[in-house]
Every structure is written in C-alpha cells, then in structure tokens.
Image (cartoon, helix red, strand yellow):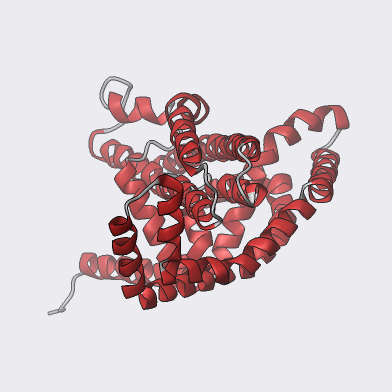
Amino acid sequence: MTIFDSRTLRILATVLLFALGLGFLYVARRTLILFLFAIFFAYLINPAVVYLAKPLRGRGRAIALIYLLLLTAITLFVFYVGPRITRQGARLGEAMPGFMERVSSGQIARDLGQQHGWSFDTQTRIQEFLQSHRDELASLAQRVGVRAAESAKEVWVLFLVPILAIFFLRDGSAFNQFLISVVQSRTQREFLQDVLADLNRMLAHFIRAQLMLAVFSFIAYAAMLGALRVPYAMVLATNGGALEFVPVVGPLVAGATMMVVAILANYSHWPFLLLFLIGWRIVLDYAISPRVMGGSVELHPLAALFGILAGGEIAGVLGVYLSIPVMASLRIVWRRWRIYAEKRRFGPLNEYSFPHEIGRGKT
C-alpha cells in the first residue's frame, strides 16, 4: 500500500516546482528587473523601428538610426538643460542642512507667521511642537537621505537598459515563436498566444502613455515653477516628471516635495504654487490621462497601491517603477487562465458564452 497516489505526487511536484520558481525569481530579482526595463524600453521605441524598417530595408538599420537620434536628443538635453539642473541640485544639497535647522529649531514657524500674519501664540505653539520633535525630524531627514543615496546607486541601469533592449528589438518575434513552440497542447498554445498578445498590447500602450504623461508634467512644472520664480524650479520639475511614472503615489510625493522645498526656501508665494499643483493634478488626472492612458491597465487604485508598496519592499525604487505593469500583467494572465479553464471544462467558447472576459481581452 502506497502512502501517496500518483495524482497526489503530481500535485506535490507541481507545488515544489512553483515554490522553487518563486525562490529563483526572488533571488534573481535584480537581474530580472534589469531585463524588464529593457523590455519596456524596447516596447517604447518599437513602433518607430517598425515604421522605419521598410524604407531603411532592415530592422538593424532602423534600430541604429533611432539610437543615434535618441543619443543626439539626450546630448542636446544634457548640454542645454543639464548644467542648470546640476547647479540647482548642488545648491539645494548645500542648503538642506540649513533648512533642517530652521525646522528643528522652530524658526520656520516664526518666519511663516510673520509672512502670513499669524498670532504670537500660534507661532509659539508651532515652534514648541517642532522643537519637541527635533530628534524625530532629524531621523526622518536621515532616512530620506539614505533612500536618495540608494536610488542614486541604481543610475547604472540607465546605461545597460538600451544595450539589452537591442536584442529584444531585433529578436522579439523569435522569442515569442520559441515560447509558443515549446507548448505541445493546442489549447495551451492558444492560451499562451492570447496572453502574449494581450501583454504586447497592454505594455506597448502603457509605456508610451506613461512617457507622454511624464513629458507633459515636466513641461508644465518647468514652465509654471519658472514663471512663479520658485527656488530650484528645474530640479523640482525634473523630479516631478520622473515621479509621474509611479501612479497614485508618485504625483503626491512630487507635489509634497515642491511645497516643502518652497516653504523651507522661504518662498512667500507658496499658496499660488499649491493652487497650481491642485489645478494641474485635476487637469492631468481627469482630462489628459484618460485620453492618453485609456484602459490599458484596468487596475483598481487599491491594487495599484498594493503593487507599489510590494514593489518597493522587494526591489526598492526600481520595484516601485515596475509595480503597475507587473500587476497589470498578472491580471492579464489570471483573466486568460480563467478563460482557458472554462474551455477545458465546457469546450470552446464563443463571444456569447463568456462575453465579459473575452470582450475585455480583445480591447
């Protein structure tokens, strides 16, 4: 008499392989994240490659031309805008100790109170509150500095991503065909083809939409912060454009950073800055973003927030940037798996037998 039958052994083997796979993904998460960024970069410029491949008679020539144009654009940006950002960033770094001293000592309460006509008692209460939490504020500033230093260490990814993306641009279709050819079952092959097709559509649209929103935000921040003469305008605008890639949390952090820096720098017109940030957020979220983003990810805000927090815990800043497309990809796999399971149970489905899932899968 055997303890485990063959079906139980197969289930245990499947669970063990799945656990080993998850363990491998966690151990190699840094390398996998690097490849994911390369894939996203390839999705970003692939339409231009497809458009130029025919007149240039080859994808290789199209890729070379696009990389040359990108390198030229980056060089011009660094040459004309880079020095200004660097100077403002250096000045901001030098001013941070003084800013923290103003906050921890409570002097900022006196300055703001005099600017906006606060009563003496209000100024005193705020100053005493800040002085009583001096150690907590210093610890918070130290943690922020450590996070910023850790983020700066990951800049090397920007140099490797375009190099790896060349292989995905050149041989992406071959990779898809290889994955499909490995699967022997017809229904499983159809499942994999549907998943890859949905992923291709979602990622291509999502990456290009996110880049457009980031560019719009950078231009709006740079123009308005410059017009309002906000201190360190270019540094704050660059930070705001970069954080636009992080849905939900990124724009809030960018706006809060602008307000904090403006107040600490003794910028007297910060209420106008606050009004601009609120107005721009409304315009971007309710007018521009729905038209640009559409329904590419279809994630609930709570699911997006969970993905951002989990991504930050697993892989730091890079994990935060990748959290939303990864969550959307998992949603696509889950939706297609449900359709595949229904096909195995009841046979082929048409558009009337499972309208909700199939209709959304083809949009």
Question: In the rendered view, does 298 fall on the left or right side of 86?
Answer: left
Q: Which of 11 and 101 is in front in this view?
A: 101
The residue at the point 33 percent across, 42 percent down is 301
Q: In which quarter of the image is the C terminus?
A: top left
The residue at the point 23 percent across, 68 percent down is 6
Rendered location of residue 99, percent (x, y): 53, 65
Q: Which of 287 and 182 is in front in this view?
A: 287
Q: Give above or below for 134 relative to 175.
A: below
Pick out the residue farthest to the left. 1
Q: In which quarter of the image is the N terminus?
A: bottom left
Q: Nearer the viewer, residue 170 or 148?
A: 148
Q: Which of 232 and 354 is in front in this view?
A: 232
Pick out the residue farthest to the front. 120
Res. 174 visible in picture: no
Question: In the rendered view, does 112 fall on the left or right side of 341?
Answer: right
Q: Give above or below for 74 relative to 144.
A: above
Res. 161 visible in picture: yes
Rendered location of residue 157, percent (x, y): 66, 62
**Which image quarter: residue 278?**
top left
Rendered location of residue 115, percent (x, y): 46, 48
Question: Count of labels shown?
Answer: 0
Question: In the rendered view, does 306 fall on the left or right side of 261?
Answer: left
The residue at the point 28 percent across, 66 percent down is 10
